[in-house]
Amino acid sequence: MYRFRDDERRVIYVGKAKSLRPRLSSYFQDISNLHPRTQQMVLTASSVDWTVVTTEVEALALEYSWIKEFDPRFNVKYRDDKSYPWLAVTVGEEFPRVTVMRGAQRKGVRYFGPYGHAWAIRDTVDTLLRVFPMRSCSAGVFRRSAAIGRPCLLGDIGKCAAPCVGRVSPDEHRAIVNDFLSFMGGQTAGFTKRIETRMKQASDAEEYELAAKLRDDLGAMRRVLEKQTVVLGDGTDADVLGFVDDPLEVAVQIFSVRGGRIRGQRGWVAEKADETGFPELVQRALMTLYQDAIAAAIPREVLVPAMPSDADIVTELLSERREGPVTIRVPRRGDKRALMQTVEQNAKQLLMRHKMKRSSDLTARSLALEEIQAALDLDTAPLRIECYDISNLGETETVASMVVFEDGLPRKSEYRRFTIRNEGQSDVAAMHEVITRRFERLLKAREDNDEDGPGIDPETGKPKRFAYTPALVVVDGGPPQVAAAHAAMTALGITDIALVGLAKRLEEVWLPDDDDPVILPRTSEGLYLLQRLRDEAHRFAIGHHRGRRSKTMIESVLDPVAGLGPTRRKALLKSFGSVKKLRVATVEEIASVPGIGAATAQSIVEALATSEQTPAVNMATGEILEDS
């Protein structure tokens, strides 16, 4: 174990290694070869010390203990934005109490969860107390009721057995608590069956009031069970972790499954402090979740999208803390794989919400534009930024996108798509073509002498398409793409617009004719804005590309249908969207498309049936085309 310290002896980085000499030597090399974040750490550090431990499990536990204790600035730290609530039962007390608890878990308490919201626990408890009337009051209320000899309101309305005034003995109350614990632990079938039997017996004996109460109790239990959806039929106890990351941040989502039912859900977004691999991100998440957890909070099985970097060590450590076997694995098929995909989708939504919340902050957007202005030495803040990306399938169907941000926000009405005319050329040549076409339109708009001014549409009074002049052009790529875009702009005489490229690997910002990139801090709002631009351009280009592929495939599989020209194919594409949806359509549904008669619809169905046996092939490349 080793620690880097700064001039003030503060710990700034914690790491572990089997062999210390080669690990430390990797930091003390030519600084230009290091990741920018590592460069900053090495330049900040003034000393290093180390501690020798006997086993790798000890080293792993000590590493995360130090990270928690010293909070080193250069380690990736998953920070939850709140302490998640648990449904807790104080089984160590004479009269156990059900309540909501947060923070560190302690002995003598049985926990269920965690839940996303405290109100979800209170709602569940309130529903179940009519079936399992155990104590839920605080110690003060319990003592006061015992002193005055009168129960509280819950005792009067039947939601507490009132052990405070002796209505039930400690053993009778403990039996109620044990039934509640069994129900929350997943043993639900026996309770519902028992209540159904007692309800029928009461009805047969004409004890209708009792039968009505049992009916209401059964309804309460079923309402709770409906909220706790069964996702794994084998009654599995597992935590399912989903991850979605980009070069700057990672979102983590956890579903807690107990008895096959989802008992809780939580998640957070963390900044990536270094060029951490995905297995290491998984490992750090596991250690963050379980390093302070009690044995009962660690499940028998942990499902992850990728095995942690030190899987055997992490498994051994969790097994020791649980005092029982723990399995960490990647689900490949079946219900567990489907659940993993659901969790990952939730993580994706979490990261999206986080980015939207951040982008809606006016102060953050203003700071981002100021940082870009300072880093690129611009005269003014770039209020309008255009970003370009290229997408292709091999050497065919090359498309490009242009997205526009104004004042740090997307302006989707200004987005444009390009289909590259010269098929087979490289991404660099495609970028040159796109930039040329875009700024030729700008020059033409500047030359138009309309009554309302250059570039103004006389009918609407608004600027024509491509008539706006951007303050900054961003291209997706490094020096080759920047050089191509710069050559295109220079050839057209465009010298008053700033140009940069954003390289994906290290998030470096490249300027034309500069040998070294501009490095923005990874936590910079300016870098975050540029990254959003690049990702949005990529998304928009991919969407256009998929649409082109759908059109190509429809043309391919419908070639044998006589009399089906471009207009009718376009109508089919517009109506069904893809070959996949067209294949499941009936003859009547296809015939309802304008211009498609019954005979043609029958021919289309026959052609699609044939193409299912013979996959569509792109004639230019020989590649099999899949449905989009």
Image (cartoon, helix red, strand yellow):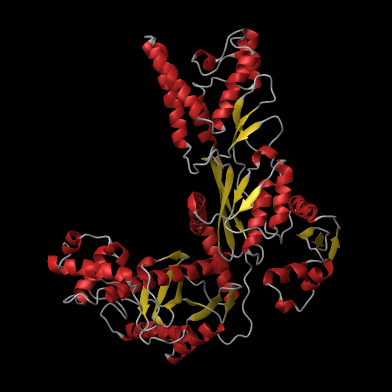
Where on the picture, by quarter, is residue 178? top right
- Residue that sits furthest to the bottom in the current view: 491
| Above or below, 388 relative to 350 | below
Q: Can you give x and y, in whole percent of width and height, for residue 494 in the image? A: 44, 87
Left or right for 223, reference 320: left
Q: Nearer the viewer, residue 446 or 301?
A: 301
On the question of residue 517 being in view, the answer is: yes
The residue lying at 51 percent from left, 53 percent from top is: 337
Where on the picture, by quarter, is residue 85? top right
Q: Nearer the viewer, residue 490 or 34?
A: 34
Left or right for 4, reference 512: right
On the question of residue 135 being in view, the answer is: no
Q: Can you give x and y, in whole percent of width and height, for residue 598 in the image? A: 13, 65
The residue lying at 43 percent from left, 24 percent from top is: 218
The residue lying at 81 percent from left, 60 percent from top is: 3
Q: Nearer the viewer, residue 6 or 152?
A: 152
